[in-house]
Image: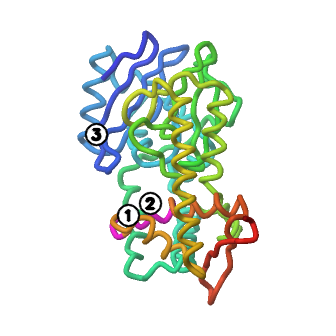
Amino acid sequence: MKVIEQTISQLTLPTPFAVGDVHVYVLKGDILSIVDAGVKTRQAWEALTTQLKQIGYRPSDIEQIILTHHHPDHIGLTEQFPNAQYIAAEPSVNTWLTRDQEYLEHYRRFFEQYFVASGIPKIFYQALDKLEATMDFAGRGEVTTPLVEGDRLPGHPEWEVIETKGHAQSHLSFLRDRDHLLIGGDHLLEHISSNPIIEPPKIGKTIEDRPKPMIQYRKNLQKCVDINVNKVLPGHGKIVENPQQLILSRLTKQEERANIVYEFLQQSVMLTPFEICKKLFPYQYKKQIDLTMSETFGQLDYLESLKQIIKRKKDGIIVYEANFISE
C-alpha cells in the first residue's frame, strides 16, 4: 500500500498471471471511488481488505467503481463492494461484466476463424479454452455510468476521461487537470511494453474488419505526449516518473521490431502470420500463442499502414510479402 497524496492511495494486489501484481487506486472526492478492482481470488481479496483498513476504510465504504478496461485482473472484485451503487467504464466493458452470451459466442467464433486464417496448427487451438478460462477471475456487474473521451469522472470533476485504446478496445485513462497526472491502467508500464491485444470486430462485421490495436496504441501513446502527461499511476509496476521519455523509447522499439518483421519478408517469397510469429518469438510462441500472435499482427498492421508489405489470401490463409515497390 502506498499513499500517493491525500486524495489518492495505491493498493497492490496479487494475481495468478505472468504480469504479476496489479494496482488499484482509492480516490477521495465528492464520492469515495476505487479505480480498478483486481482479480477474483481469495489472496487478492485479503490483500485489498488489509490495505483498505490501513488507510481507514472497509469495502463497504466504497461508493463507486471506476474501470480502466475489461481484463480480468482489473474487474475481478467488482461484486465485493456492497455499497458501490455505480460502475463507471467504457460502455463495452458491460459485455464482460454481464457475460453477454451473444458477444462471448461472437468472440469465440472470431478467434476460431482468426486461428485458421493465420495458419496456426490445430495443436494450438486449446489456447481458445484458455481465453475463456481467464473469465473465472473476472467479477460481474453492470456499467451504470458509461464513459467516453472528454467526460469528467463522476464525483471527481478534476479528472478528465482520455481514450487510450490499444491494449484493450475498452481502455480508458484519467488525466488530472492541474498537474497532468494520469491514472493509466495498462496503457504505459515502466517495466514491460503493453501488448496491443487482438479483439473481434463488432457483431455483424467480418474478420477483416477487426480493430488494429497497434495502430491505435501508437496513436494514443502520441496523444499522451501531445497532452503533456507528466506522471503515470500504472496498473502494474513502478510509477512512471518520466512518461515522455518512456513513450519515445516504446515507439522506437516497436519500429525496430517491425523492421525485423520486414526483413523476414524481404528474405522470403511470402509468409503466413504464424510463420512470422515463430520467427519473431522462437522461444515464446508455443506457450503464449495468443499474446505472440497479437504482437505479430500488430507489427504487420503497422507495416501494412506504411505500405511496406502486401497482404494476400492463399487457399484461405492470410500471407504477407514485402512490397519492394514501396522502397
Tag 3 secondary structure: loop
Identity of the residue drawn at 71% across and 67% down: 205
In the drawing, what numbered circle is on residue 291? 2
Q: Is residue 112 above or below residue 170?
A: below
Examine the structure image and report whether residue 287 is included in the region drawn in magenta.
yes
Q: Which residue is mark 1?
A: 288
Residue farthest toward the right in the current orientation of the protein? 325
Q: Spatial distance from mark 2 to mark 1, Cα to Cα?
A: 6 Å
What is the crowding at mark 1: few (fewer than 14 residues within 10 Å), some, or many (at least 20)? few
In the drawing, what numbered circle is on residue 120? none
Q: Position of residue 309 (x, y in %)?
A: 67, 69
Q: Is residue 297 above or below residue 228?
A: below
Q: Spatial distance from mark 1 to mark 3, Cα to Cα?
A: 21 Å
**Depth-wise, is mark 2 or mark 3 nearer the camera?**
2
Q: Which residues are magenta?
A: 286-294
What amino acid type should be assigned to the residue bearing mark 1?
Gln
Chief SS of the magenta region = helix
Marks 1 and 3, the one that precedes in the sequence: 3
